[in-house]
Image: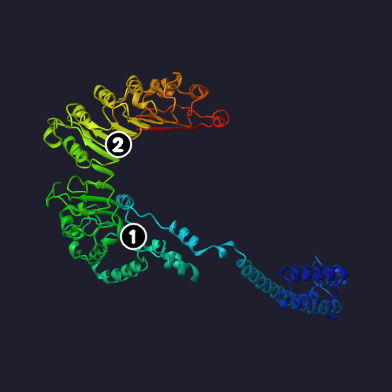
Amino acid sequence: MDEITPSPTADSYGSCERRTTALQACLDDRYDDIPRIGERLHCQCFIEPLCQCFEAAFAALSSPAAHLLNSNRIPSPQEIIQIYDTLNDIQRASIQLETKIRSLESALKEFRNKQDELQSFAQEHKALLSPARRMLPELWSEIFIHCLPEHSLDYHINRRSAYNGTTRLFTDVSCSDAPLLLTQVCSTWRTIAISTPQLWSNITYTVCRPSAMKIQLRRLETWLARTGAAPLSVVVFRSFFDANNNVLDHPHLTFPDPIPPLNEDQVMNFILAHSHRWRRAEILLPALEAAQVVAPLRGNLPNLEKLAFGLFWDGMTAMGDPHGRLDVFETAPKLQEVCFVENARLQVSLPGSSLTTLSVDAFLSCTDALKTLYYYPNLRNCALNVMLTVSAPPNLEKLIGSSSGGLIRLQLRSLTLSFTGSTDFVYPNFLAYLDIPNITELRIRSHKWFHDQLFAFFTQLPQSALVETLELSSPSLAPVWLRAYLLSPVFRHLRILVVGEGITHHVPFIPNDAGLQSLFTSKGFLPGLEMVQWTCFGQGTEQYDSTVLYDMLRTRLDGGRGLRRFVLTLNRKWGDELSPKRPSFGSDGLASLGLQVEIKTGQY
């Protein structure tokens, strides 16, 4: 059989020309191989003619023994010769087809390689037009700063509590997190990242194995060298180890190497040596070692503005004050915000003149809480947890003097008081000592509500006090009491009202749905109210349906008042069935009036 030579038709030729022209126009004749690809397309575009030729060859092919097919008859000697000749012809044709197939595959592979080269070439040039190339390095630096992982003591405390044996308990620098991750993308990013001091100004340290101490020190030295003169933010989180190197927080976790005392930890000492650059510090230490560890900080905190400090005791040591008060932070002239976490109580002295924000997580006695407020009269924001006990009422006349009328006059703008306990013996005495004429945000949380004492406290607030944010959270707060409080003149400019938040314990409750309805059915009541966040307790919550809630809110809006957000949480005790229907609102009626509504259901 003669070799079949393809002859491209006019259509195939025109198609090849169009493809070549399109490729040439795409890159504006910048790629030298495009003309050769066009020639290749011209001379080898023979798929359709080839198929047509072989279809004709197969159509002309006839069997020399068609009458013997599908039968058991034996071919004659002449038919046997003809069959062999036909098989030879088929074999030659098959070889020719295989040759053409390989030629086509080779051409197709070459075309695809050229196409990949063209696409790669085009992609490289498209990258030149990317807006990212025109961004200033300063903008990249700002973006990189927002890529930093969370850097706070709360994060590491929660991480320790959630430890499951698979995550890293001990903090270490990770190449999978910023800023080290940013240095591995490209040379430009690496240059920008290294030249951005703020990326390297966050330092977190928990504990270092002695065998890795030198490596950690070199890494930390390099890290600090990149900070330039930028202020530092330091988180030091040290778990407590017993004599067998067991982490007391996790009795089944053992540290492999012997852990040296904190005062012999070279990495810790290196971090403390740079305390003059600290702007923010969050520290959690074992109580028995804290005084000795932080001693080098005395007089060496000229730039410290924010401090979170915590102490914790092991199970064998009672909570107390084994080493006296820590006064190292008292010499920090710029210290303004302090948060005592874990079991840090009154063992730490603070600068009384500059301190403006104080938060204490641990429970304080009434006397200690009042002393705290008295020692720091310039506080603007304060949050305290007060333990109500059966001890005698505090006698602070010697402390505050008789000239003040027995009141601690404070400059507070925001005060959060969380009471725990079940006695009312000292409750009124605590509140009776407070004089807060400048208060604008007041939050009171208590499991047991003492109406008479609270009513007297609200009544004694001066007329000049204009409270804009009020939270009253208790499952035993009766609606009639709430309304009596809100009628006080100090709440006439109230903008944000929160009722029932922050109470998670299973305690007796009083249904408060009636109090919610009174907010919206009384004309002229709290005219400046912009946000209501209400947590309902008890079975009365099932009375709320979409129609009732919609009518209540619409009544408020029809009065021309500025309510903008309403959050309702329908709470039940565990074991009580929730209402089968959760109230919901369409977005047309209330949203068109500018009111954002959110309905939640939960249990406590």
Q: Residue at x 30, y 36 (%)?
A: 415
Residue 80 placement: quadrant:
bottom right
Give the SS element for disc 2.
strand
Which coloring applies here? rainbow
Residue 425: x and y in percent read: 17, 27
Q: Which residue is mark 2?
A: 415
Q: Residue at x 56, y 65 (%)?
A: 133
Name above or below for residue 429 compared with residue 213: above
Q: Quadrant of the C terminus?
A: top left
Between 258 and 595, the one nearer to me in the picture:
595
Residue 69: x and y in percent read: 82, 67
Dot 2, how many residues are within 10 Å of its Cα: few (below 14), some (14-19), or many (20+)?
Answer: many
Between 470 and 117, the one nearer to me in the picture:
470
Marks counted in the figure total 2
Between 428 and 343, the one nearer to me in the picture:
428
Q: Which residue is mark 1?
A: 231
Identified by mark 1, the residue type is Pro
Give the SS element for disc 1.
loop
Name above or below for residue 7 compared with residue 578: below
Q: Is residue 186 visible?
A: no
Q: Quadrant of the N terminus?
A: bottom right
Q: Is residue 575 left or right of residue 80?
A: left
Residue 52 placement: quadrant:
bottom right
Q: Is residue 113 visible?
A: yes
Name above or below for residue 190 compared with residue 43: above
Identified by mark 2, the residue type is Leu
